[in-house]
Amino acid sequence: MLSHRLQAAWVVARRDFVAVVFSKAFIFFLLGPLFPIVVGFFAGAIGASVQQNLDRVVVGVAMPDGQGDLLVKARDALAGHMEGGAPDFVVLDRLHPGDRFDARRILKDKRLAAVVTGTLDAPVLTATRERIDDWNGMVALFAARAKTGEPAVFPPVRGDVVATSAAREHSGQVLTAQAGQVLLFLLTMLLAGMVLSNLVEEKANKIIEVLAASIPMDALFLGKLFAMLAVSIVGIAVWGAGYGVMVLAGLRSIPLLAAPAVGWPLFLVLGFLYFAMAYLLLGAMFLAIGGMANTVREVQTLSMPATMLQLIVFFFASFALARPGTWLERAAEIFPVSSPYAMLARAAQHAALLPHLGALCWQALWVAVIVRGGALLFRRTVMKSGPAPRRRRASAV
């Protein structure tokens, strides 16, 4: 009996997978999320070019008797040893005795951040108050170096490097957990809607009634769930490949995250498994909702509470992440719909693997329960094939 149901579910899954993946609509569905990535690539490239030009800070120098050249050389010798570097120094004019130089006018006419005039003994920095506060000591250091003309000798510093600290490692793992939860939520919400639309379309075409008359309803629901899960994996693979191409072409990659407690390979495997469970749980709920809806308008009305519930569940799991060791964290890990998010966050912070095995089994059990309940609800409300209510016999008179 079980093998028959699994075989029927496999037939439905294969049929739905081929029908969706090889359709024109699916191609446009795949291209949809790639457009923001392409726009972000070009916007990032243009923004980086503009920012590079804006970040180039230039200080003009106008001093007599070649002192400006000495100041520029001093800057070149010392800038590499300064944290964050130093602005570029450019000689604007080599003044002769009696020459006058209007630094204020030059600042208005040229794209300069500041102008250094005067002499090496008494340099004058013309700039805004913020620039003067930041660069006053720097200009004095360069002027002193230019006056002596002696090469600066920097003693070697022996570094005693600490790879990380416990507090920093924990903070980084929390950020990794948050990033995993957000990505899991976005992928689930983006892809789970296909289950609902597929079922409603087949109900409108009366295909679902033919299938329901041929195979058990729970096998039908299970096959549709796994078919849409396989379609979602194809979509994620295409989007991931597209993003990888953009990164190779020069797109700024995502910030580096701290290594999770279980290590990146296991974390990615668990992330895939928890995505599958979150998708199956939400998809099973959507199947149950789609079984009660007859039109697209009814689907939108009925799916809104489920979508809002999913948002609440995500916020609940995120809030529990900030309360480690409390009953909130345990509740988020036990509650079936929030369990994938909470357990993925746990994988980022704790190295134990046995709790994940129990959590995956627990989530799989609830997938089966929701699928079974949705199938019964669909059969009773749509197919009208449930047991008929007993009628009371009229008493003989």
Image (spheres, rainbow, N blue to C red):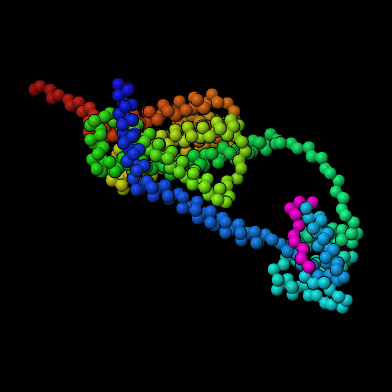
**Considering depth in this image, is 335 or 211 the residue closer to the camera?**
211
Residue at x 47% of width, y 28% of height: 360
Tell me, yes or no, if residue 147 can be seen here: yes
Locate residue 243, reporting x and y percent.
51, 47
Locate residue 228, reporting x and y percent.
38, 38
In-image side of 126 versus 22 (left or right): right
58 relative to 258, above or below: below
Which of the image's four quarters has the C terminus? top left
Dividing the picture into quarters, in which one does residue 12 lie?
A: top left
Locate residue 68, reporting x and y percent.
83, 67
- Which region shows up in magenta? 81-91
Locate residue 334, reporting x and y percent.
49, 29
Residue at x 52% of width, y 54% of height: 40
How many labels, in total?
0
289 relative to 62, above or below: above
- Decide whether residue 17 is among the magenta residues: no
Which of the image's four quarters has the N terminus? top left
In-image side of 213 versus 259 (left or right): left
Q: Residue furthest bottom?
A: 98
- Decide whether residue 84 is among the magenta residues: yes
Q: Residue furthest left?
A: 397
Residue at x 44% of width, y 40% of height: 188
**Considering depth in this image, is 12 or 195 the residue closer to the camera?**
12
Residue at x 67% of width, y 38% of height: 168
Tell me, yes or no, if residue 302 can be seen here: no
300 relative to 5, above or below: below
